[in-house]
Image: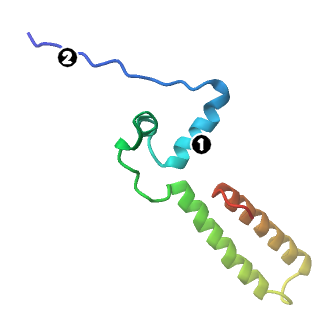
Amino acid sequence: MTEKTTREAPISYRPPHELREQFRARVEESGLSVNAFITAAVFGDDTPKPARRASASRADVARLLAETALLNERLKGLVGDADPALLADAIRDLREIRAACLKALGRSP
């Protein structure tokens, strides 16, 4: 008969309701998994540092921000060839997209 091995019960953390969003934001900002974040918080500098690379979503937002700059330059090149009202609307929309991208990256427009 084989001997069954039992696993240890996991240690869980349930932040207070009013701190959950802040907790999730700090974990996301750290670039660590929840487990690694809690371990680092409890044991300090004894844990390995995360690799310095942007998460896919931050990289996507940064790419979109660069694309808005290129589109803005192209739109400026259309001055005189396009309907001025449509051109103004497009530039305003690009500014709103740019502001949203900057906010997502934690920067001010």
Which of the 4 image quadrants contains residue 17? top right
Which of the 4 image quadrants contains residue 58? bottom right
Question: In the image, residue 64 lies at what x, y percent?
Answer: 63, 66
Residue 38 vs 8, above or below: the answer is below
Question: In the image, residue 100 lies at what x, y percent?
Answer: 72, 58
What residue is shown at x 68% (from left), y 75% (from top)?
Answer: 69
Q: Is 11 situated left or right of 93 in this image?
A: left
The three-letter code of the residue at mark 2 reads Thr
Residue 49 vs 72, above or below: the answer is above
Contact check, label 1 and label 2, Cβ < 8 Å: no
Q: Is 19 situated left or right of 80 in this image?
A: left
Residue 70 vs 108, above or below: the answer is below
First reached walking from the N terminus: tag 1 or tag 2: 2
Q: Locate the N terminus and report the quarter of the image it occupies.
A: top left
How many numbered marks, from 0 up? 2
Which residue position is annotated with label 1?
25
The residue tagged with tag 1: helix, strand or loop? helix
